[in-house]
């Protein structure tokens, strides 16, 4: 798979896709790929609703909860590039269907996990399956759709990439009303089977007619770099940034990405050519997508706990409380191509990131007694930002490369999304956890040691302990909720600043107009 920044054309692949879509139609291909996309994205977010149950059922600490959420995302982020390259060689639909099998089997196995270690391991295997699925979804759409329809297909894909998270949470919330957290994994396994059959029936099996030799060094260096970075963020806040293992992880991160850049510039056919980041539209799109998903999935990790632990919502009600995001994101994403033609890519991208940053900041100002309406205000503001920034960022990446390079464009888009998700969960989860622990009162030491330790481990466990204490637990519950809100506020402020910085960067450096499509 060539990743040279020069635009190319791959007519044999174009003709192959056109024949296949003649049977299924573009709408059939779009449906199949968005269904597989929802399977992958929903599994990032769905388990967030079960975090309070996992904290109690498996005695999971804040750090363990972060790893349960991030084990899936780290594997997906680290492997999506090399597995996207394999799909380009042997057929994207073939790899996608194989990925649904891996995903389904691992999801079913996760439903039987009886410890946090086992659950984290099976979540990582699910991430492997997801990394096989994800690249084929966008690259099949961009390869199968003619240039004049591609922007609409990409915008629809982008909208479902964001809305899929809400769909997953709604399904998980409904399941948790009547069943345990294990039902989420059983349902995911069944959904994987449906996605595989749909892709088999409706999607073309596109591939690169002239594949390049595999770039093993690029695959290893990017995988190691991503994994080490997330490990350092999570464990740095948990153990302390001066711990030798954390410092070692940061050193490995720098060495791995330095190795990737050095070897990539010298490799004839790199997995992801570092020179691509010299294309302004490609670079701006990658940064926009990365920070957007960092903010969105980091927010889901802590925001759902706010709805359940502070407002007392059931899992289903908590998921339903986020529906306004999907209601705003989908039409906004659909309108983005028209908006880009009118005001330009730079303006659309910048405004989207500013709205997202503003929405997160509004939510960061909440306290224990704020209720849902102020939360909703920030949510809607962020939703408009997600719809604008996600669609235009994805279009900037795919539009910067030719039809013959849509495999790498899709893989890069997927990588930035999943790296952003993994880092967002790690960053916000870690900041939240460290502030939560530091704001608990000293009077906690007067509790029995096991109760005090459980309260420090997670807010959900702390509220469970307070319930066991009866009338004496009211003060503990108030302290736990107050500490939770301190952690929530700190994590949201940190990420809103990062998104704001990205908006300023786009304003200064992003191209005004989108790259021309071939």
Image: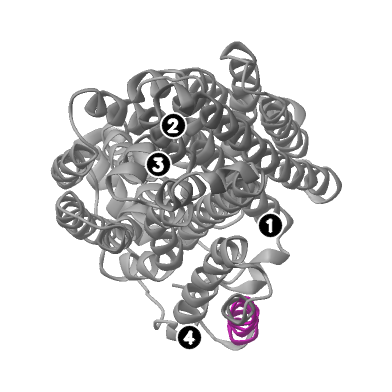
* First reached walking from the N terminus: tag 1 or tag 4: 4
Q: Calculate the distance from the C-alpha at mark 1 to the C-alpha at mark 3.
A: 24 Å
Nearer the camera: disc 1 or disc 3: 1
Q: Dividing the picture into quarters, in which one does residue 248 lie? A: bottom right
Residue with the mark numbered 3: 145
**Callout 3: helix, strand or loop?**
loop
Q: x%, y% of residue 2? A: 49, 73
Judging depth in this view, the residue of 214 and 65 nearest the camera is 65
> Given contact means CB atoms under 8 Å apart, are the residues at marks 2 and 1 in contact?
no
Q: Inspect the magenta stretch and tell me whether residue 183 lies in it.
A: no
The mark lying in front, picked from 2 and 1, is: 2
Label placed on residue 217: 4
Residue 380 place in picture, x, y as percent? 60, 19
Q: Badge 1: few (under 14), some or many (20 or more) residues near its Cα, within 10 Å?
A: some
Residue at numbered disc 2: 466
Q: Quadrant of residue 298?
A: top right
| Disc 2 from disc 4: Cα separation | 52 Å
Q: Nearer the viewer, mark 4 or mark 3?
A: 4
Residue positioned 65% across, 15% down in the render: 374
Dominant secondary structure of the magenta stretch? helix
- Residue sitting at x 22%, y 55%: 103
The stretch in magenta equals 250-264
In the picture provided, is 223 more to the left or to the right than 60? right
Mark 2 or 4, which is nearer the eye?
Answer: 2
The picture places residue 84, in percent across and down from the top left corner, at 38, 64
166 lies above or below 509:
above
**Residue indicated by mark 1:** 283
Q: Earlier in the sequence, mark 3 or mark 2?
A: 3
Q: Is residue 373 placed above or below 56 in the rendered structure?
A: above
**Label 1, label 4: how far apart the Cα atoms are:** 23 Å
């Amino acid at each position: 798979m060539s990743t040279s920044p020069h635009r190319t054309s791959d007519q044999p692949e174009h003709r192959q896709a056109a024949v296949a879509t003649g049977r299924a139609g573009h709408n059939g291909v779009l449906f199949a790929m968005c269904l597989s996309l929802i399977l992958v994205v929903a599994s990032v977010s769905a388990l967030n609703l079960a975090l309070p149950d996992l904290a109690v059922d498996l005695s999971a600490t804040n750090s363990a909860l972060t790893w349960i959420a991030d084990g899936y995302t780290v594997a997906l982020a680290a492997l999506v590039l090399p597995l996207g390259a394999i799909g380009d060689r042997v057929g994207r639909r073939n790899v996608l269907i194989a990925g649904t099998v891996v995903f389904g089997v691992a999801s079913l196995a996760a439903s039987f996990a009886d410890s946090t270690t086992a659950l984290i391991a099976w979540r990582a295997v699910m991430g492997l399956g997801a990394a096989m699925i994800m690249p084929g979804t966008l690259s099949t759409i961009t390869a199968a759709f003619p240039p004049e329809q591609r922007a609409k297909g990409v915008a629809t894909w982008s909208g479902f990439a964001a809305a899929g998270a809400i769909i997953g949470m709604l399904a998980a919330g409904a399941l948790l009303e009547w069943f345990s957290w294990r039902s989420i994994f059983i349902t995911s396994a069944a959904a994987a089977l449906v996605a595989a059959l749909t892709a088999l029936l409706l999607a073309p099996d596109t591939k690169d007619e002239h594949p390049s030799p595999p770039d093993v060094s690029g695959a290893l260096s990017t995988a190691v770099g991503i994994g080490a970075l997330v490990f350092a963020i999570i464990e740095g806040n948990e153990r302390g940034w001066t711990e030798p293992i954390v410092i070692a992880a940061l050193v490995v991160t720098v060495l791995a990405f330095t190795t990737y850049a050095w070897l990539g510039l010298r490799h004839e056919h790199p997995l992801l050519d570092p020179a691509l980041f010299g294309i302004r539209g490609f670079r701006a799109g990658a940064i926009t997508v990365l920070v957007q998903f960092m903010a969105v999935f980091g927010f889901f990790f802590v925001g759902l706990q706010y709805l359940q632990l502070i407002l007392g919502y059931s899992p289903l009600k908590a998921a339903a409380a986020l529906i306004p995001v999907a209601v705003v994101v989908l039409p906004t994403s659909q309108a983005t191509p028209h908006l880009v033609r009118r005001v330009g890519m730079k303006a659309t991208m910048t405004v989207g990131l500013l709205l997202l940053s503003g929405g997160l900041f509004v939510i960061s100002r909440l306290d224990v007694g704020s209720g849902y309406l102020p939360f909703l205000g920030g949510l809607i503001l962020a939703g408009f930002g997600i719809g604008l920034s996600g669609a235009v960022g994805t279009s900037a990446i795919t539009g910067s490369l030719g039809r013959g390079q849509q495999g790498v464009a899709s893989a890069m888009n997927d990588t930035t999304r999943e790296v952003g998700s993994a880092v967002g969960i790690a960053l916000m989860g870690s900041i939240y956890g460290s502030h939560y622990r530091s704001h608990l009162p000293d009077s906690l030491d007067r509790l029995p040691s096991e109760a005090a330790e459980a309260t420090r481990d997670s807010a959900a466990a702390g509220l469970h302990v307070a319930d066991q204490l009866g009338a004496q637990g009211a003060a503990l519950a108030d302290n736990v909720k107050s500490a939770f809100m301190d952690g929530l506020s700190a994590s949201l402020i940190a990420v809103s600043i990062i998104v704001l910085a990205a908006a300023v960067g786009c304003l200064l450096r992003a191209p005004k107009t989108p790259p021309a499509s071939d």
